[in-house]
Image: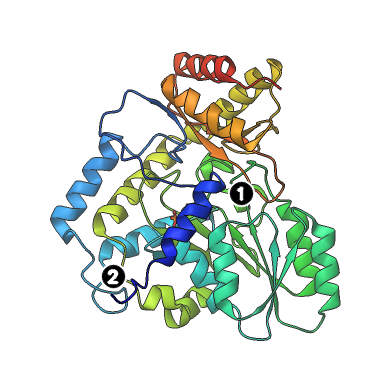
Amino acid sequence: MPQDPFDWTDDAARRRADAGLVRSLRPRPADSALLDLASNDYLGLTRRAEVTEAAASAARRWGAGATGSRLVTGSTELHAELEHELARFCGFESALVFSSGYAANLAALTALSAPGTLIVSDAGNHASIVDGCRLSRAETAVVAHADPEAVAKTLDAHRGRRALLVSDSVFSVDGDAAPLSAFAGVCRAHGAALVVDDAHGFGVLGEGGRGALRAAGLAGATGVVATLTLSKSLGSQGGAVLGPARVIEHLVNAARTFIFDTGLAPAAVGAALASLRLLRREPALADRARSVASILHGRLTEAGLTAARPDAAVVSVQAPSPESAVRWAADCRAAGLVVGCFRPPSVPDGISRIRLTARADLTERQIGTAVATILETAPEV
Ligand SMILES: Cc1ncc(COP(=O)(O)O)c(C=O)c1O
């Protein structure tokens, strides 16, 4: 019998099981009784009737799929409308929509660098940024987390080279914000571009949710590009890159994840557009998401838990060990509350956590239930 060429996956599975690192899917029913503090639906828009109706109506009008890549048949007038409104809302000259935030990050990093470019990347950056750096074939220098001095030192050592600094605006594990103003100052002083992934800031930070770059006075600034996902605050799916018109035009011509990928489905475009318009009408949603995060943080830390003060809508609560974090999350679920769980190796600082995402639509009662459940199930320290 010839050997099955995938026999090696059994060894990999055994190693994962021995390390307690098996991941598995848990399909959720459409109507779950569980209280969700794990999704990224920060503004509670994914099920708003106006948004789901817009998705359905876009599918009826434009079709279930985009039918092709953006440069062939996959650009509808709806895509153009979303790009125009996203750019205007966030304060950038131009925007380009992608099939995911992941693809948007790959596009920005690969198309805006070349072999010989230096990419300076924050150590806490999201996996899609890490992968973008790898794919870019540029030299990547990973620098200490949220450390403008480390960035300056690295750029100093490579003066004269084309350079780009890339950072999340809000880091997804701990919910802390990047020092964007200081980063921008360092970039300006060194003639480097600044690429900021605002996945967790857009919809939550800045005036009416216009994002972290707007909050830092950097939206539309020279040398600054933002990437976004439409899958968190806007409750839809897809991603975008925002920046100067000539940069966006360059991406249309050079970004492989734009050129060789089917356009975002019209339903997702329609939903994102409806959410964006809703957010423009209800700017208090952004404030509410931040204030729910702050209430959760306040009550949990007053009760003795350790959690960093949230800069946006992510609240990360420390657990004493990886095993206790896993058990804590499981006990919360058994009690009707879904929370996220992070542990090494996916957290570089080695600290295990349960992670809560605040939602603008959580009621006082739901917040009370969530806090009570987390405290009742908390591990002994
Ligand atoms: C910081 C960050 N960037 C990018 C992404 C990728 O976005 P998408 O899910 O739209 O691919 C995510 C999460 O999913 C994220 O948390």
Residue 75 badge: 2
Contact (Cβ within 8 Å) of mark 1 with mark 2:
no
In the current view of this chain or complex, which residue is farthest to the front? 1
Q: Earlier in the sequence, mark 1 or mark 2?
A: 2
* Amino acid on which disc 2 is placed: Ser
What label does residue 212 carry, if any? 1
| Quadrant of the image containing the N terminus | bottom left
Height in image: 139 above or below 233? below
Image location (x, y in percent) of residue 275? 36, 44
In front of the other: 185 or 143: 143
- Left or right? Give the position of 319 relative to 254: right
- Judge whether 156 appears above or below 184 on screen: below
Question: What x and y, as percent, mark residue 5?
Answer: 36, 73
Q: Give the residue type that dot 1 points to.
A: Ala
Residue at x-position 85% and y-position 60% = 149
Q: Secondary structure at mark 1?
A: helix
Task: Using the numbered discs, state the Cα–Cα distance from disc 1 to disc 2 in whole angstroms.
Answer: 28 Å
Left or right for 51, reference 117: left
Q: Is residue 200 left or right of residue 186?
A: left
